[in-house]
Amino acid sequence: MLPGAVLQSVMIGGGYGTGREIVEYFTQYGVWGGMAGLAVATVCIAVVFALSLELSRRFKVYDYRRFFQVLLGRSWIVYEMLVVVLFMLVIAVIGAAAGEILNDEFGLPRLFGVAIILVAVVVLNFYGRELVTRMLAFWSLLLYAVFITYLATVFVTMSDAFTLGLEHNGVGEGWFVSGLQYSFYNVTGIPIILYAAMAIETRRQALTSGLVGALIALIPALMLHLSFIAVYPSILEAELPVYEVFSGLGFALLKLAYLIVLFGTFIETGAGSIQGFIERLDGWWAERHEQPLERMTHGCIAGVAVLLAGSLSALGIVALIADGYGTLAWGFLAVYVGPLLTIGVYKIFFAENPRNLVKNLS
């Protein structure tokens, strides 16, 4: 379950946790259209996750650089160019969402949210993989507890509004493509978090971890989609859709708990994503100097990444999610999902002497 918990923590960032991604890719297609889109995304992520974990296990590659050297050979750099843009976009969405929340709740300047994310991410990445992995797994359990309480409260408190929302049961056109598009840019987090899959020893473990991991990652999205039915269709225009729901609940303590977990998830997403980049740099550095980079360097890398991405957060969360994520999705289909389902499947089941292949690539 650990790879799935870590993937969930990386996925549930500013767009997912605030509900903006869920509205953009699922809820706007109606109650059942959103459910169908979520089913498509879950199946796609499960297949890609399972195959990626098995390729990683068989070739003993646990950072995205070596993973894509196995998958794409010398063309692996194309993935890195895309993933660096995604890093910046994800952290920018986190910063924008954190700023919006602090401004709405406490009247603090939006840049204050970026500052908190910066400090927390630098500290986590300074102490390295073990702390990041443990924090991501623990926070995933806490997040589930809060999400289940949130959904139960919506059903009990807003039952009439929920029943009324179910009348919007049409299936909007485009739900299938939207589900695919959502999965294409979210599966890009899988090669980044391969450091959480080092304990996988067998093919059965790898494939099972991928299937279970997809469910762990997307069940909270289903919970959010169901809760949004109670405020449909006004939810479609909300900058922070979860706030739209909480305005109808009136439970200040639950809202505070959700915000604490959400803010922690922002930090996790930033730290987990940057840890994947650090693992890639450590592998490259160790090949040349026989030792990984120092902790201080890890912290500096995290700090620079957050500062650069923070400058993008001024664009706003809606624009970043609608335009940035959607465009990148098709690029990752070409350089990751497509090759994995063809070249990757061949190498998993038919390639011989995987250790010699990795040695030659090095």
Image (cartoon, helix red, strand yellow):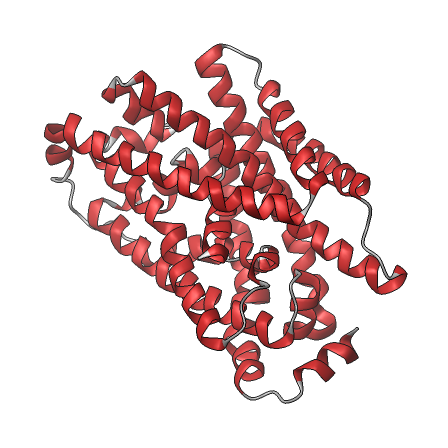
Front position in the image: 240 or 362 = 362
Residue visible at 86% across and 62% down? 290
Residue sitting at the far top: 107
Is there any visible trace of residue 158 in the rendered image? no
Is residue 30 among the parts visible in the rendering? yes
Return the x and y of residue 225 as percentages of the image width and height: 28, 41
Residue 215: quarter of image: bottom left
**Residue 207 drawn above or below residue 39:** below
Is residue 273 depicted above or below 154 in this figure?
Answer: below
Q: Nearer the viewer, residue 167 or 230?
A: 230
Rendered-image quadrant of the N terminus: bottom left
Task: Name which residue lies at 77% across and 78% down.
Answer: 359
Drawn side of residue 255 relative to residue 153, left or right:
right
Classify residue 134 as left or right of residue 274.
Answer: left
Is 140 drawn above or below residue 263 in the view shown? below
Dividing the picture into quadrants, the one containing residue 189 is bottom right
x, y percent for residue 2: 48, 55
Q: Nearer the viewer, residue 21 or 135?
A: 135
Q: Which image quadrant for residue 244?
A: top left
